[in-house]
Image: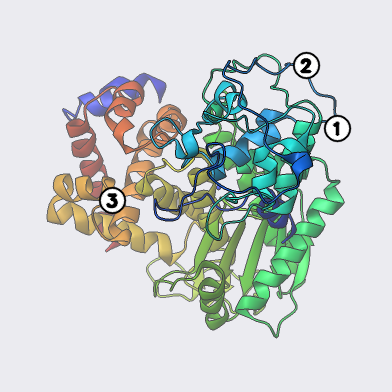
C-alpha cells in the first residue's frame, strides 16, 4: 500500500503500599491564602523564638552565601534533585517565589535557597538543628511551615535533615541558578525509584494488597482468585479456562500497544503490573467506581481504567456474569440469520470479556503515552479499534460503526469536527475516533503508527500530523474519511 500513500488524500481533494511510599514523601502542595501565610524568615526581634538559646538565630550575613559544594553523593546519600527539591517545589514554592516572596524568601533556585531570607539564612550546612527550615517544619520555631493544616510528613522532614547533615550539597553538574522545578524529580519519578529498590515479589505483593482492598469496595463478599502474568495481575472469580484465555490475550495486546505507542526517547513505561478487576455483577462494578473513583458510571459503560496513579488498574463487568462458555466449539450461525453467538463464542453476550478489557487497556495506555495530552477521540477510538481485534464479530463494534455512519448522513464535516474537538457526546467522539483510525489502517496502513504517535502530543497537532503522515489537508482528510465510512459502514445499520 505504500505506493498509494500520496493519492489516498489527494484523490478525494482531500496508561496500598507504593501509594503509601508516595504519600509519606510528599504532602499536598500548600494552597494557603494571604490571610494564613506567615513569613518564613522574620526580622530580628519581630517574633519570639520557641527554642533554646543554644539554637538561637545567628546575626544575618550581609554577603551572599557561597554555593554549597557539589560533590556527588554516595549510593546511600540524599540527593538534592531526587529527594529534596521535589518536596520544596510541591510544598513551598507556591509562596516563596520572586512574585510572592513570603518572608522575603525565594527558593526557586538553589542559589536563592542557600542565600536565605533578607536577615537570616535558613540552611546551615552540616547543622540541621540550627537550620531555620528544619526548625519551622518541625514546629520548633514560629511561624511553623507550611502554614495552616498542611504539615509536612515526617519522612520528608527527615530527608531534608539528612541532606543538610550531609553538607547541603547540590548535585554535580546542575547549575545552582537554574529553576529548581526544571530538575526536581516528580512524585511519579520518585515512586518509580522507590519501586526499583523492591524485589519483583515485593512489588507484586503491593499490587495484590491494593487490589484486594479496591475489589472489596465493589464486592466485599467475594474473594477473587489471582492470575499473575508478566504484565498483569487479574482479580476474578471465573472458570479457569476463561481466566487463562483472558491473560494470554491481554499480555499479547499489551506488547502490541506498547510497540505502537512508544516513541523515540519516550517509551510507554508502566512501572508496575496492571491490575485487572473483573466483576461478575454489574452492581458490584458500579459500586467499585463509586467507591474508588468517587463518581457514577454511564449506563453503557462496561469498564473503567486508571493508569496515572500507584497500582494502575482496569475494572470491568464481565458480559457473561462469571458464567462458563456454554457454546464453546460450536459453529456460528450462518450470516444473515439472527444468532446468539457473539465475539469469541460466548453465549448470549454482545461482546467478549477480552474485548471489554482490551478496550480499556488501549484507552489507558494511549492516555499514559500522551502524558495527559492524548485527544479523547484518539484514546476512545483506539479502544474500539483494539476491541475489534479481540472481538472481531461482536455487536459492540458494529454499533460503533453504525453510529459513525449516522454521523455521515447528518453531516460528517461539521459533526466530525465537533467530535475531534471533544465538543459533543462521548459516543460520537468514540465513533468518529474509531472510524478515522479504521480508515487510516485500511487505506494507509504504513502511515497508521506515525499518525497515532503524532496525535499523542495533543489535538493541536492534527493538521501537522495529517500533513506529515497522510500528505493532505484537514479538509481532504474529512472528505476522504466520510466517503470511506459511507461505503464500508453503510450496510451496518
Place residue 319 in its image quadrant.
bottom right
- Quarter holding the N terminus? top left
Residue 173 on image: x %, y %:
67, 14
Residue 468 on image: x %, y %:
34, 21
With 365 as the anchor, is 123 left or right in this view? right
Residue 209 on image: x %, y %:
76, 65
Name the residue tied to disc 3. 422
Looking at the rendered structure, the secondary structure element under dot 2 is loop
Mark 1 vs 3, N-terminal side: 1
At x 42%, y 42%, the residue is 374
Mark 2 vs 3, N-terminal side: 2
At x 46%, y 42%, the residue is 95
409 or 261, nearer to the observer: 261
84 or 95, nearer to the observer: 95
Q: In this view, does 444 lie above or below 178?
A: below
Within 10 Å of disc 1 (Cα), the crowding (few <14, some 14-19, many 20+) is few
Looking at the rendered structure, the secondary structure element under dot 1 is loop
Residue 96 visible? The answer is: no
Name the residue tied to disc 2. 71
Mark 2 vs 1, N-terminal side: 2
Name the residue tied to disc 1. 76
At x 26%, y 43%, the residue is 484
Which one is closest to the eye, mark 1 or mark 3? 1
Q: Mark 2–mark 1 contact, CB under 8 Å? A: no
Q: How far apart are marks 1 and 3 (CA)?
A: 48 Å
Which one is closest to the eye, mark 2 or mark 1? 2
Rendered image coloring scheme? rainbow
Residue 4 visible? The answer is: yes
Q: How far apart are marks 2 and 3 (CA)?
A: 50 Å
Looking at the rendered structure, the secondary structure element under dot 3 is loop
387 or 166, nearer to the observer: 166
Amino acid at each position: 500500500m505504500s505506493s498509494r500513500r500520496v493519492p489516498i488524500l489527494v484523490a478525494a481533494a482531500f496508561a496500598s503500599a507504593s501509594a503509601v511510599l508516595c504519600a509519606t514523601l510528599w504532602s499536598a502542595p500548600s494552597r494557603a491564602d494571604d490571610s494564613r501565610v506567615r513569613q518564613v524568615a522574620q526580622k530580628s526581634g519581630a517574633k519570639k523564638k520557641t527554642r533554646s538559646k543554644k539554637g538561637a538565630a545567628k546575626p544575618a550575613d550581609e554577603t551572599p552565601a557561597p554555593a554549597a559544594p557539589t560533590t556527588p553523593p554516595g549510593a546511600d546519600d540524599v540527593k538534592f534533585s531526587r529527594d529534596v527539591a521535589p518536596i520544596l517545589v510541591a510544598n513551598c514554592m507556591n509562596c516563596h517565589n520572586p512574585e510572592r516572596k513570603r518572608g522575603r524568601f525565594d527558593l526557586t533556585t538553589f542559589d536563592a535557597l542557600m542565600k536565605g531570607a533578607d536577615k537570616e539564612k535558613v540552611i546551615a550546612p552540616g547543622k540541621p538543628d540550627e537550620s531555620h527550615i528544619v526548625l519551622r517544619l518541625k514546629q520548633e520555631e514560629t511561624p511553623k511551615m507550611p502554614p495552616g493544616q498542611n504539615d509536612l510528613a515526617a519522612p520528608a522532614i527527615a530527608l531534608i535533615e539528612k541532606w543538610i547533615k550531609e553538607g547541603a550539597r547540590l548535585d554535580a553538574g546542575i547549575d545552582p541558578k537554574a529553576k529548581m522545578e526544571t530538575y526536581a524529580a516528580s512524585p511519579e519519578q520518585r515512586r518509580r525509584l522507590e519501586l526499583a529498590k523492591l524485589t519483583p515479589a515485593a512489588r507484586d505483593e503491593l499490587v495484590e494488597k491494593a487490589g484486594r482492598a479496591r475489589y472489596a469496595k465493589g464486592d466485599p463478599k467475594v474473594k477473587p482468585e489471582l492470575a499473575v502474568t508478566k504484565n498483569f495481575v487479574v482479580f476474578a472469580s471465573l472458570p479457569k479456562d476463561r481466566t487463562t484465555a483472558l491473560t494470554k490475550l491481554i499480555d499479547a495486546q499489551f506488547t502490541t500497544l506498547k510497540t505502537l505507542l512508544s516513541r523515540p526517547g519516550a517509551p510507554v513505561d508502566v512501572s508496575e503490573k496492571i491490575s485487572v478487576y473483573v466483576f461478575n455483577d454489574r452492581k458490584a462494578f458500579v459500586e467499585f467506581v463509586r467507591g474508588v473513583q468517587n463518581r457514577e458510571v454511564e449506563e453503557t459503560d462496561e469498564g473503567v481504567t486508571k493508569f496515572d496513579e500507584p497500582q494502575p488498574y482496569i475494572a470491568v463487568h464481565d458480559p457473561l456474569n462469571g458464567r462458563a462458555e456454554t457454546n464453546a466449539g460450536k459453529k456460528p450461525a450462518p450470516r444473515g440469520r439472527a444468532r446468539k453467538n457473539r465475539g469469541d463464542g460466548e453465549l448470549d453476550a454482545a461482546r467478549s470479556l477480552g474485548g471489554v478489557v482490551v478496550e480499556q487497556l488501549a484507552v489507558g495506555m494511549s492516555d499514559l503515552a500522551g502524558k495527559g495530552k492524548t485527544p479523547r477521540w484518539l484514546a476512545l477510538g483506539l479502544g474500539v479499534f483494539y476491541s475489534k481485534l479481540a472481538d472481531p464479530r461482536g455487536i459492540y463494534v458494529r454499533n460503533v460503526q453504525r453510529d459513525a455512519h449516522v454521523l455521515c448522513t447528518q453531516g460528517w464535516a461539521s459533526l466530525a469536527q465537533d467530535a475531534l474537538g471533544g465538543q459533543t457526546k462521548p459516543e460520537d467522539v468514540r465513533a468518529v475516533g474509531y472510524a478515522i483510525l479504521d480508515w487510516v489502517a485500511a487505506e494507509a496502513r504504513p502511515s497508521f503508527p506515525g499518525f497515532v504517535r503524532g496525535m499523542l502530543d495533543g489535538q493541536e497537532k492534527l493538521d501537522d500530523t495529517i500533513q506529515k503522515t497522510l500528505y493532505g489537508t484537514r479538509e481532504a482528510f474529512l472528505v476522504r474519511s466520510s466517503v470511506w465510512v459511507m461505503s464500508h459502514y453503510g450496510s451496518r445499520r
